[in-house]
Amino acid sequence: MTDPPQPPLKKLSAEEFGNLFYKLFEEDNICKRRGVSRENLAKKFGCAADELDRRLEDTTGLTLDMIMMLYWSQQ
């Protein structure tokens, strides 16, 4: 059984998206949890994992996997 399609991410400004991204990564310590799935993280944004990656690339130039690799390389 597959999950129903996720609605597209609401059109957030770059600042709003950055604030949400910061909240999830810094306040919820998502980067510190090894093995967090892209799909579960995307659900927090209300979108599919591919949509989250696209939006991250549009706003930061990096995909979620790249961000996680950068985070762990600094630890």
Image: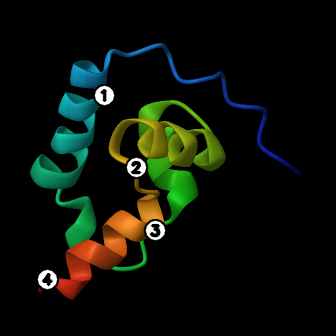
Indicate the position of residue 30 as horizontal and vertical percent values.
Answer: 26, 60
Is residue 67 shown left or right of residue 38?
left
Indicate the position of residue 31 as horizontal and vertical percent values.
Answer: 25, 67
Identify residue for label 1.
Answer: 17
Identify residue for label 4.
Answer: 74
Indicate the position of residue 48 as horizontal and vertical percent values.
Answer: 63, 41
Identify residue for label 2.
Answer: 61
The numbered mark, 4 or 1, whose residue comes first in the sequence reads: 1
Question: Separation of disc 3 and disc 2 at Cα?
Answer: 12 Å
Foreground residue, 40 or 50? 50
Q: Is residue 33 visible?
A: no
* Amino acid type, callout 2: Gly
Identify residue for label 3.
Answer: 65
The numbered mark, 3 or 1, whose residue comes first in the sequence reads: 1
The numbered mark, 1 or 2, whose residue comes first in the sequence reads: 1
Is residue 13 shown left or right of residue 29?
right
* Amino acid type, callout 1: Phe
